[in-house]
Amino acid sequence: MTADLTMRIPPVMLKDVEEGGAPPPVRNVVELTDGSGAPRVVAYIERELPPGGIPAYLAARGTGARSFVLWADERRGSRVATLVTQSAHHGVATYQVLGAHGEVIGTLVRQKALKGRGIRTRWTVGQPGVPEAVGYKGRIFWWLVCWLMSPLLPFVVLAAALNNGDVPRAPRRIRWRAGGQLLLDFRPFNDRLRLCAPELDWRLGVALVALLHSFNGWSGIPWDGRKK
């Protein structure tokens, strides 16, 4: 059975603290749809700050480092999983997804475009007992179209803004395959990640969705890049 994961991010900034000094509830959520009923929230996503707080996180973020907590509820009652950075340098970042008790769920690797393995960003998903899956951001055909249109991009953006349309974005669809089998499929039109293989751990999928959204394009601030 396939399942779809979708991240919901509130469009407005929340207060740093509630009345009485309590931290606000976690609002970034990931919903799962598996055909058995209405979408249900399976995790509340929040960045995990280092000792230096937000400035330290944002400084490390520039190298590709990320650190997220997947909570079971909006009040941070218990952890579902944690994403940590193992290494991030020279355009290659390796992340590990850990379970509630620190056990390894899987590994995610992002290699930026033009960093040794082709002209597209390369994503690798690994889970113990499951073949390693590799996916590339966007199809080559649409990247060629994008590059050919790049001299006209300022005019296209202006026309979209004047007509209240969507700002054009670079190709973002990613399909992960292992041995010719499709394991994951990220569809940018609805920002939905489809788990095509039942043996994939949904927690790894949730961490991947949050990670993909943290690398959103130039047209906005990614959810984990906020200064507050």
Image (spheres, rainbow, N blue to C red):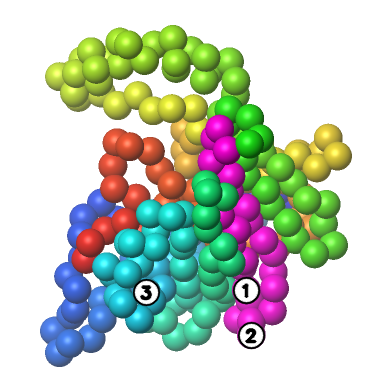
Q: Say whether residue 103 is magenta.
A: yes
In what element is the residue under mark 3?
A: loop
**N-terminal of the two: label 3 or label 2?**
3
Q: Nearer the viewer, mark 3 or mark 1?
A: 3
Question: In the shown orientation, is residue 191 left or right of residue 80?
Answer: left
Mark 2 nearby-residue class (10 Å; few <14, some 14–19, many ≥20): few
Location of the C terminus by quadrant is: bottom left
Labelled disc at residue 49: 3
Residue at 30% across / 75% down in the picture?
Answer: 53
Residue at 50% across / 33% down in the picture?
Answer: 172
Q: Say whether residue 74 is magenta.
A: no
Principal secondary structure, stretch drawn in magenta: strand
Residue 150, position as x, y percentages in the image: 36, 15
Residue at 46% across / 62% down in the picture?
Answer: 66
Kind of residue at disc 1 = Leu
Between 217 and 189, the residue placed more toward the observer is 217
Question: In the shown orientation, is residue 39 left or right of residue 198?
Answer: left
Kind of residue at disc 3 = Leu
Kind of residue at disc 2 = His
Residue 182, compared with residue 42, is above or below; it is above
Magenta-highlighted residues: 93-115
Labelled disc at residue 98: 1
Between 199 and 175, the residue placed more toward the observer is 175
Residue 197, compared with residue 77, is above or below; it is above
Q: Nearer the viewer, mark 3 or mark 2?
A: 3
Mark 1 nearby-residue class (10 Å; few <14, some 14–19, many ≥20): many
- Write down the quadrant of residue 99 in the picture: bottom right
Q: Is residue 91 visible?
A: yes
Mark 2 highlights which residue? Answer: 101
Residue 137, position as x, y percentages in the image: 57, 34
